[in-house]
Image (spheres, rainbow, N blue to C red):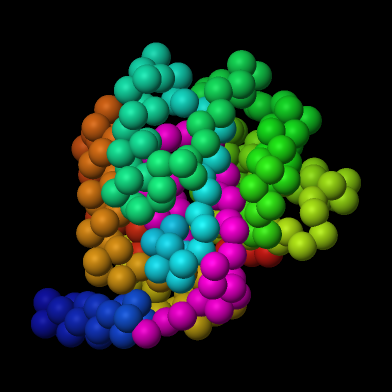
Amino acid sequence: MFPFFLALLSIFYTLYFLIAQFSHSSFIKDKSKILIVTAHPDDECMFFAPTILNLLRHNCHVYLLCLSSGRFYNKSSVRKEELRQSCKTLGIPAGNLIISEHGQLPDNPTIKWSRLKTSSIILKYIRHLSATIVISFDETGISGHLNHIAVCESLQYLSIKGQLPEDCEVFLLKTVFLLQKYLGFLLVPLLYVCTNFCFVSTFHDVKTTWKSMKNHKSQFVWFRKLYIIFSQYVYINTFIKL
Ligand SMILES: [Zn+2]
């Protein structure tokens, strides 16, 4: 049984290696202006690292808008600094990080953010940066966090109201089932074949993601250490187009 398991693991490992080395996601043009919208410091490396690292490799201009400073633990200044360091590790230029700290958008899993306020902040930065691609959470927000969901609903609202610039496309990071979420790289071959919109991390990217997460010292508790080893979001991001 054990040799069979090892053989199977080797096959998945090899397939992952080949896909990571040779895949090229062409759904986003090189040198595009991309706005990634997150809710909290650490979302960027816990969920979006394969995307960020691939986009930077293709000379895209990556901007990160984080809509709160992680005040839930009353460590706002610590968490802002951790986010700056995390972005530095990922390769996002310091000037491309925007941390919004609006009173109506607190870091709190029990408070639903105002859709109007959230969408107006996002739209302000889309216009200001002339972003042609916006990337964020889908309607279940990966972890079900209400703040993540609010970001998605605000983007949906902007789209329905026709307020997004004509040349602006929105891609939402697909939430996967709990078991699938922790199968790490094992499902990458299948997911890669089944979607048109995805980014796969190379081994170097995975190491960079781990380093980036370590910058979030205040959050780096045991279950997050396990998360960054096993989570699929460290190895592949798949998207749906809004
Ligand atoms: Zn979050």
Residue name at image x 68 percent, y 64 percent: 241
The location of residue 176, given as percent across then percent down, is 51, 58
Q: Is residue 174 above or below residue 212?
A: below
Magenta span covers which residues? Answer: 22-51
**Horizontal arrangement in the rendering, residue 24 relative to residue 185 (left or right):** right
Which residue occupies the foreground of this view, 11 or 18?
18
State yes or no: residue 48 in magenta. yes
Camera-nearest residue between 21 and 9 = 21
Instruction: Measuring from the top left, give residue 149's x and y in whole percent.
Output: 62, 40
Name the one closer to the observer, 188 or 45. Answer: 45
Q: Is residue 153 magenta?
A: no
User: At x 28% / y 61%, what residue is drawn?
Assistant: 206
Classify residue 11 as left or right of residue 114.
left
> In this rendering, is residue 113 above or below 14?
above
Residue 65, quarter of the rendered image: top right
Quadrant where the N terminus is found in the figure: bottom left
Residue 23 visible? The answer is: yes
Where is residue 9 drawn, in percent x and y?
A: 22, 78
Is residue 236 in sight in this rendering? no
Q: Is residue 62 above or below residue 124?
A: below
Horizontal relation, residue 129 to residue 89: left or right: right
